[in-house]
Amino acid sequence: PRYLFVQLDTGMQAKSWAPIRSTLGVSRLVHFGSTPAKVDDQLVDLLRTREQTAAPQMMFEPGQSVTIVDGPFAGIEAIYQTTDAERRAHILLELLSNQVRLSIDPASLRPRESSATDTKP
């Protein structure tokens, strides 16, 4: 996650890296000193193949009630929304009568255990 491989000419006629650096979401370019890092095409192909064959795992279902089990919000119940490309879970929790969206490590979540009072009519 969060890596983008680009193929550019590095000769004297090469275009500037400025458009890439100024693209929304790009935090920095990987480089060694002042030289941009070069990655072999075969490695990029291997990574692409692994990404395509790795089945995404659903941790929770959207809308599922979860409990935060560690960290500053431990013990608070929330509603699972989705997982992002970095495999962080996005949840909604209620704080001071407002719903707040929070990004959290999915290992910090557990499905909410239902109790006898949770039965639906």
Image (tube, rainbow, N blue to C red):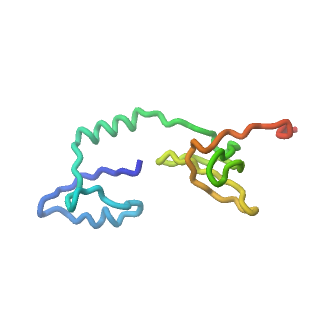
State the residue at coordinates (22%, 66%). Answer: 16
State left or right for residue 7 relative to residue 65.
Answer: left
> Compared to 92, does 112 lie above or below?
above
Question: x and y percent of residue 104 in the render?
Answer: 57, 50
State left or right for residue 90 relative to residue 38.
Answer: right
Of all residues, the one furthest to the front in this rendering is: 71
State the residue at coordinates (69%, 54%). Answer: 93
Question: x and y percent of residue 8 in the render?
Answer: 21, 55
Q: Quadrant of residue 66?
A: top right
Q: How many marks?
A: 0
State the residue at coordinates (68%, 39%). Answer: 111
Question: x and y percent of residue 56 in the render?
Answer: 49, 37
Question: x and y percent of residue 59 in the render?
Answer: 58, 38
Q: Quadrant of residue 35?
A: bottom left
**The C terminus, quarter of image:** top right
Q: Quadrant of residue 115?
A: top right
State left or right for residue 115 relative to residue 28.
Answer: right
State the residue at coordinates (57%, 53%). Answer: 103
Of all residues, the one furthest to the right in this rendering is: 121
- Give 24 or 39, whichever is nearer the viewer: 39
